[in-house]
Image (spheres, helix red, strand yellow):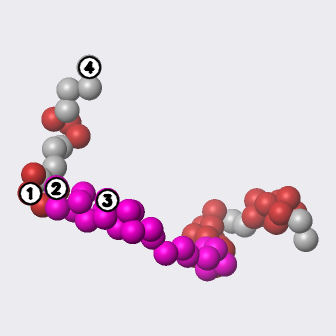
């Protein structure tokens, strides 16, 4: 079976079953271990958010 054929089959899945199909398909995608610099960046971001909090989206002047 080709990927194109599989894509075509997915189009036949009713909308209410897409979430179930997603959960099944995602199990076949291997997880990768995060790199040490990725972990460091996450920890730095968490620390910054803890110390400085966040700014509400509507409080930013986008112009």
Quarter of the figure with residue 45: bottom left
User: Of discs 2 and 3, which sits in the foreground?
Assistant: 3
Mark 1 — residue? 51
| Image mark for residue 48 | 2
Extreme residue in the left direction = 51
Crowd around label 4: few <14 · some 14–19 · many ≥20 (10 Å): few
User: Of discs 1 and 4, which sits in the foreground?
Assistant: 1
Spatial CA span between label 4 and label 3 = 29 Å
Mark 3 — residue? 41
Secondary structure, mark 1, is helix
Q: Which residues are magenta?
A: 26-48
Extreme residue in the right direction = 1
Mark closest to the chain's N terminus, 4 or 3 = 3
Mark 4 — residue? 63
| Labels 3 & 1 near each other (Cβ < 8 A) | no
Quarter of the image where the C terminus is located = top left
- Name the residue: 16% across, 49% down: 54
Extreme residue in the top direction = 63
Spatial CA span between label 1 and label 4 = 27 Å
Q: Position of residue 15 (x, y in %)?
A: 63, 62
| Labels 2 & 3 near each other (Cβ < 8 A) | no
| Labels 4 & 2 near each other (Cβ < 8 A) | no
């Amino acid at each position: 079976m080709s990927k194109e054929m599989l894509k075509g089959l997915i189009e036949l899945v009713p909308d209410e079953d897409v979430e179930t199909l997603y959960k099944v398909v995602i199990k076949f995608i291997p997880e990768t271990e995060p790199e040490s610099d990725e972990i460091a960046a996450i920890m730095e971001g968490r620390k910054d958010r803890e110390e400085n909090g966040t700014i509400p989206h509507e409080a930013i002047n986008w112009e």
